[in-house]
Amino acid sequence: MQTLDEFASMAVADVRAEAAQIADTEAALADVRGEVQLVAAAPAGKSVARGHRRRFLMVGAAAAACVAVVVTAAVVGGDDQSVQPAVSPSTTEAASLTTTTGAAVPSMSSPVWDEETGSEIVFQFEGASCSIGLCASWEYMAPLVTSDDRIVIGERYGSRWLVAIKGEETSVPYDQSWTLRDAAMSPDDTVYAVFDVGNELRLYRYPKADMASPELIGEPRAEFDNAAVVLDLGGAPSEEQVEFDAGTFIVHRPMNLADAEIVPGVGDELLVDVTFVGGSEKSYHVHPSGAADRAATTSVHPLMEKVVVILLDGDVETFLSIKVLLPDGSMRERQIPLLQTANTNAQRFVDEGYYYLVTAEMTGVGVEAKAVYSVRRFALPKADAPAAAATTTLPSSNTAVPTSSTAVVSGTSLVGVEFGTAYDDALPILTQAWGDQSRDTTDQYPDNLDGRWSDGDESFSHPFMRQLCWETPAFVCAVFGGESEDQLTLVGRWASGGPNVPSPVATTEGLGIGSMAADFGIEVTPVPAEGCTGLAYGHTDDGIHVTTTALGEATATTPDSVDVVIQMVAGEPTTDSAVEC
Amino acid sequence: MEYDDFFRAEQPKMVALALALTGVPEAARDLAQESMVKAYRAWPSVQQMDRPGAWLRRVTINASMSWHRSHRRETAAIARMGGEGATVQPEREGQQFWAAVRALPDRQRAVVALYYLEDQSVAATAAALEMPEGTVKTNLRMARAALALALGMSDDEKGSD
């Protein structure tokens, strides 16, 4: 009989030969050099910042405290009139805030303001270091925040729980032969964790987040590739019950936050009768998009006594469709891709006018790599802020940060230069606004296809294109087009940058890079799940196309109202203006 | 060492490693490229490491496993729906071996990939993965038993450790 090693040797030779055929080493080396140079010149709005690519984000796995995390500030404010205004960065002492579910937020004596994300870092400490790459493979779980101010983090690589309070960290090891797959925490601080032990999955319970005292729940199950634990906190039954479905432990824990009953309606429709805390009742008609049999996997998750969230599985398990049912009768929907981040996990919740982002993130490279745990809070717009029409006066917050080089734009102009202005007439005005351009590119589109000009790959309004860009540090670009390179006129303009970067442009209403879309009455629509994640599109009444991103994260699982503008385009865009995923 | 020399020495090996862990040539090329780009961006730090090759292998293994997990969910779901793109049966015997490796748990898969593909000793594998040697041996033993069972073979030990 052939031995395993003999077979393996043959297999190794096989894969090496195939790899040699496809490696194309010299071309790949040239691509590396070309790619890194291109990224270095990219506008600030591109999401390849921070030296790594966010390829995936797993929602529902890796320590989601209550699974559903999509709520809006308007909803929270609408049900609770005591929404607090944003805390100014000059605040030296951050009060310890308590959420309505009882989970307290740890605090530092002097919160730090993070310019890049526009957040206060309320709590932060560095965990154990380990080499990047392998640690990222068994990434740190998203932190769980308990009601008594502890942060609990599952560290797979070290086979332990990290428990931190006020910066003091203790280590609670578990068996090294176990692999932690997922964890979640209910509002009463019970942690549920799924372990891979040998070739079986086990679910353990840790009452009061006592990580030294695991209690096995039920029988072990066969191993699945995507093990997870999900909490269902609403309605019947009266005591804890656990289901298991294709790798997912579904723990039913009635928390009486809200009762909801789901009844199949006509066709795909679901009828959801919700009783909120306080006694108000509301019925909803919910239409899942996709296969009818997904109604069987629908679950209801009351969150923070204010909203009810229905989770529906996606068609190919690549996204979750979340419908948030709000006490005011409205319903929001968002699709969240089921992706996995290599370096960061996070949980989020909204409380008292703030959006909290709790993360575990690997930073650094090699021996300098370490884990950083943060609790950040972002000020949310007031619930009663009016939706600003194009002619209203400026809101008191979230307008473009004015600088000496902030230029006025509209849907048809840049710095007062209207579309159609000749290049030679436009250039002096643009130079006066921002100085000499930092980038000057041209392109040609020789093929006329139904009124558009094409180079076989991209199209443009004219056969000749010239683009001038200024790095302020946000990018602002003027796009010229014409029948020849001597007949160019202004045909478009775009500006792109990250949040809290001084905006080089602003409308007369104050909309600029870094503005909150909701402040200007801009309805944004998330990009479809098969495309970018974390981006949404909208437009102003006069035709400025805006791209927004969820504040502080590159993947969108945040409330609509924290969508911040990272790009404004009017007229003819170019491929440079495309925001990368 | 200059980056270009590092690239020429390591890139083909990373393609092979990613190919073993994913089974998809296009993905293997892209994942290897991603690892080399990360090394390039961090080259001042990577260059100073005692074992930059070990770092690179860890990065590649991590990226390959993430891809594999994501791809398996999609493939399983598509197969459930009766569509194309369901699991493809390996054609060659060598592919059978790597398909069986990809069915192992994460840690065992990483250990096996380095132990066989890189022809490393237990000590070298432990150093590359920054694991205790005992852990490597345990995972290797479990992996070999599972592979032997899956492939219907005898699990005779390799000569030198």
Image (cartoon, rainbow, N blue to C red):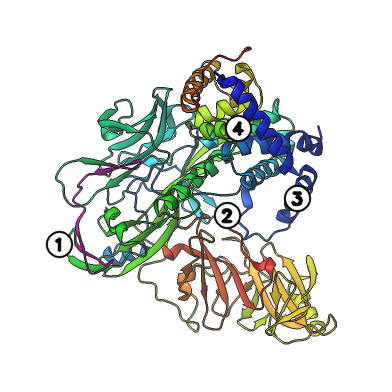
Please tell me if label 2 and label 3 are on a single chain: yes
Depth-wise, is mark 1 or mark 4 nearer the camera?
4
> Mark 2, chain letter?
A
Distance (Cα) linking label 3 and label 4: 30 Å
Q: Which amino acid does the dot numbered 1 rest on?
A: Gly
Q: Position of residue A254 (x, y in %)?
A: 19, 47
Q: Is residue A305 magenta?
A: no
The residue labelled by disc 3 is A31
Amino acid at circle 3 = Asp
Q: Chain of mark 4?
A: B
Amino acid type at circle 4 is Gly
Q: Return the residue at label 4.
A: B94
Position of residue A524 relative to residue A50, above or below, is below
Residue name at image x 48 percent, y 24 percent: B152
Looking at the picture, do discs 3 and 4 lie on one chain? no
Q: Is residue A365 visible?
A: no
**Residue at numbered disc 2:** A116
Are discs 2 and 4 both within one chain? no
Amino acid type, callout 2: Glu
Picture residue at 45% right of the left edge, 71% below the top: A518
Query: Magenta region, mostly helix, strand or loop?
Result: strand
SS class of the residue under badge 1?
Answer: loop
